[in-house]
Image: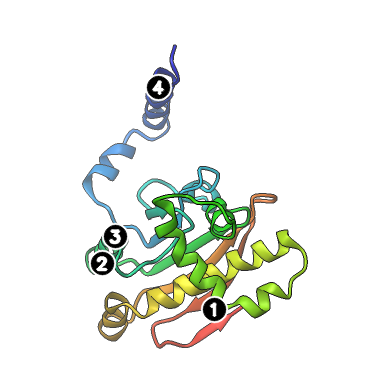
Amino acid sequence: MTPIDILLKNNKEWANAQVKADPGFFKRLEALQTPEFLWIGCSDSRVPANQITGTKPGEVFVHRNVANLVVQNDLNAMSVIQYSVQVLKVKHIIVCGHYGCGGIQAAMSNQNWGLLDKWLYHIKTVYVKHKAELDAIPNEEERLKKLVEFNVLEQILTLSKTDIIRNSWKNEQAPELHGWVYSLSNGILKSIIEMVPDSNMQIN
């Protein structure tokens, strides 16, 4: 049996288990999508949104990319954000980074990553903005952890400046923005920044 065959077999077993435990499970999912949360996370396979937040299918709308970036000329991300805010009417947007992020590490290396370098440029700009504080941290691991946190902070600030969010705050008084970091070592989420529609900001 190939790895792909195993995935398909696991899928059938999962689907059968869901129906056995809750016969109406798929009917409800098929009928309506009303998630309260948009999750903008890293593509890293070790950071699955539903599992680490204890949420079920249908409860979290998810967008993932390398290093959980919010880039205003990224049509993919902006389309997801617009749809989630204007159509799904999500109440919360979470940007979640994680310690040990390969994208953060790659951005800080001197290697040539080809096409990926164009994406990593956005992380490098975060580093330049916070260079003095980051360079003052002697331990490389701790410095990278701090850059992960700064990266989440900057993505929330970028998100808050988009027309999508500004217009929604003006008209709908939603969504709230949350910047979190996930620890691979203990599975705990840490809040870095919280922003509410009246633009009051709490940085932790």
CA gap between label 2 and label 4 equals 34 Å
Amino acid at the residue labelled 4? Ile
Question: Residue at horizontal 37%, vertical 55%?
Answer: 63
Residue found at the very far top of the displayed protein: 1
The answer to which quarter of the image holds residue 83 is bottom left
Q: Kindly state the secondary structure of the residue where label 1 is placed.
A: helix
In the rendered image, which residue does mark 4 sit on? 4
The nearer-to-camera label among 1 and 4 is 1
On the question of residue 182 being in view, the answer is yes
Of callouts 2 and 4, the N-terminal one: 4
Q: Position of residue 85 (x, y in %)?
A: 28, 68
Question: Dot 1, crowdedness within 10 Å: few (<14), some or many (≥20)?
Answer: few
Q: Position of residue 121 (x, y in %)?
A: 45, 64
CA gap between label 2 and label 1 equals 28 Å
Q: Position of residue 106 (x, y in %)?
A: 55, 54
In the rendered image, which residue does mark 2 sit on? 82
Question: Dot 2, crowdedness within 10 Å: few (<14), some or many (≥20)?
Answer: some
Amino acid at the residue labelled 3? Val
Q: Kindly state the secondary structure of the residue where label 4 is placed.
A: helix
CA gap between label 3 and label 4 equals 28 Å
Amino acid at the residue labelled 2? Gln
In the rendered image, which residue does mark 1 sit on? 129
Amino acid at the residue labelled 1? Lys
In this figure, which colouring scheme has been used for the structure? rainbow
Q: Do the residues bearing badges 2 and 3 touch, measured as CB atoms within 8 Å?
A: yes
Question: Residue at horizontal 49%, vertical 57%?
Answer: 67
Relative to 6, residue 46 above or below: below
Question: Dot 3, crowdedness within 10 Å: few (<14), some or many (≥20)?
Answer: some
Relative to 108, residue 21 above or below: above
Of callouts 1 and 3, the N-terminal one: 3
Residue 80: mark in rendering: 3
Would residue 62 be found to the left or right of residue 168 on screen? right
